[in-house]
Image (tube, rainbow, N blue to C red):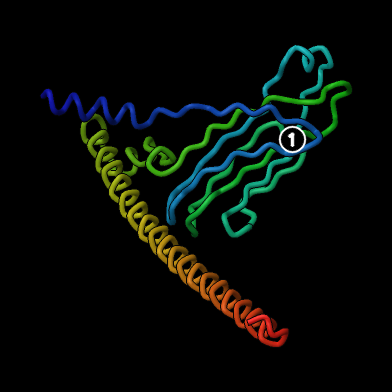
Amino acid sequence: MEVLKVLLVAAMAMTTVEAVWLEVSTSWPKCIHEEIRNNVLVFANYFVIRDDDHIQANVLPTVSVEVTSPFGNNLHHEENVTHGQFAFTTTEPGKYLACFLMNNNVPGSKSVTVGIMWKTGIDAKDWDSIAKKEKIEGVELELMKLEGLVQTIRENLVYLKKREEEMRAVSERTNAAVARFSIMSLSICILAAAMQIWYLKCFFRKKKLI
């Protein structure tokens, strides 16, 4: 029972999601990004937060939203919206970018606060729908969540190991290139010094100084 309680607490903690708050202006887009591996589910909600200035003006500012993949593919694009959501499954590993730009539609307002709830992997799954479809509930559902969490952790470790191998290979190639450049530079310096000595010796002999 104690082990089961620990597993249930872990499952509850794993589904906790915090919102990100961005101060978005009309002059320059504000972006958030996350490094995500391949074949990962991503789900996000975004919404403009009304403040006192907007209440007085009785107008809620709108924003433009653009989500791009590491290779620059457009995954989501909306203009003049106050809220929305997007979902996709990653097809390439790397940095996924979501940018927000305020539209200049509220007189005197230069910025607006945008809230984003960004979920990836197991947190992005609709567990209520899964539970209804699989006809499971309670402990069995929590165990399924934990199974998904363990699988996610394993896949992340494999991804990190692969990235470490790639970085090590890049580092080794860089070190080899630096070593070759150093040897080449030293050889050029020695050759230049030898040529200077030879030239000076010829010059002094020509002048009959030696």
> Eyeballing the image, is 209 above or below 26?
below
Residue 111 percent across, percent down from the top left: 77, 26
Residue at horizontal 66%, vertical 82%?
A: 199
Residue 38 percent across, percent down from the top left: 44, 56
The residue identified by callout 1 is 63
- Lateral position of residue 160 relative to residue 51, left or right: left
Residue at horizontal 43%, vertical 53%?
A: 37
Residue 208 percent across, percent down from the top left: 69, 85
Residue at horizontal 27%, vertical 29%?
A: 10
- Lateral position of residue 62 relative to residue 118, left or right: right
Q: Secondary structure at mark 1?
A: strand
Task: Place residue 73 in its image quadrant.
Answer: bottom right
Residue at horizontal 87%, vertical 21%?
A: 108
Near-viewer residue (187 or 152): 187
In the rendered image, the quadrant that contains the C terminus is: bottom right
Q: Three-letter amino acid code at disc 1? A: Val
Residue 120 percent across, percent down from the top left: 45, 42
**In the image, farthest residue toward the right:** 107
Task: Place residue 195 in its image quadrant.
Answer: bottom right
